Image (cartoon, rainbow, N blue to C red):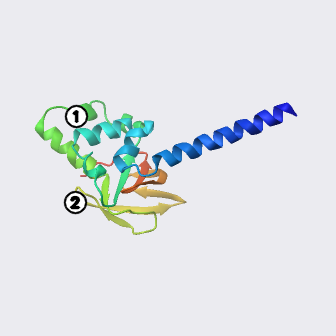
Amino acid sequence: MKAKGLLAAGLLFSASAVCTSAAAAEGDTLWQVIQDDERLTTFATAVEASDLDERMSEEGEMTVFAATQEAFDALPEGRLDDWLSDDKTQHRRLVEVVSYHLVDGAWQPGDSDVVTTLQGTDMSVEEQDGDWQVGNATLVERDIQASNGVIHIIDAVLIPE
């Protein structure tokens, strides 16, 4: 009987810890949410290097398709290092890539089948067998709310042509 009580207390503690962390995140901007998510450390580095972190902290709704660490790891060797280098041409390319992950307004699956990125290019969005595809990526987690928009985590880095 004592074990059941401890198990129940542990579950209650776990549930309250989850609720507390969700409540603490309420009011966080897109940039704060991205910085706090361990799966998005490389994406956060790219955002900051491209000087788009301030844009993600501003008022006004935005959608972020945030690529995971694994997505960046799948890039050809040296590609990310090139983008993050001091070379001005590579820096412009980094800004293009990161802004291709951003959309004005809070897009949700089913809203439209095309989104216009901040980079200026239209990108297709479609449902395939229950999974949502944006460009060449799949949404692996969606609808992460922030005070100024929504984040959808994706499994590939979106690279404009």
| Disc 1 to disc 2: CB gap under 8 Å | no
Q: Position of residue 130 (x, y in %)?
A: 54, 60
Give the SS element for disc 2.
Answer: loop
Give how far across and how far down residue 147 sits, in percent: 39, 55
Q: Residue at x 22, y 42 (%)?
A: 50
Q: Position of residue 25 (x, y in %)?
A: 46, 47
Q: Amino acid at mark 1?
A: Leu
Above or below residue 9? Residue 146 is below
Mark 2 — residue?
A: 120
**What's the residue at 34%, 40% (across, down)?**
43
The residues tagged by marks 1 and 2 sit, at their Cα atoms, a distance apart of: 22 Å
Q: Residues within 10 Å of mark 2 (few under 14, many from 20)?
A: some
Query: Which one is nearer the viewer's eye here, 140 or 77?
Result: 140
Q: Residues within 10 Å of mark 1 (few under 14, many from 20)?
A: some
Rendered image quadrant of residue 108: bottom left
For the view shown, which residue lies furthest in the right direction?
Answer: 1
Q: Quadrant of the N terminus?
A: top right
Q: Nearer the viewer, residue 61 or 99?
A: 61
Quadrant in which residue 62 is drawn = bottom left
Q: Which mark is residue 84?
A: 1
Q: What numbered label is drawn on residue 100?
A: none
Looking at the picture, which amino acid does disc 2 mark? Gly
Ranked by sequence position, the earlier of labels 1 and 2 is 1
Residue lying at 81% horizontally and 36% vertically, measured from the top left: 5
Apparent side of residue 123 relative to residue 95 in the rendered image (left or right): right
Residue at (76% x, 35% y) in the render: 7
Position of 3 compared to 84: left or right?
right
Q: Image height check: is 124 above or below 154?
A: below
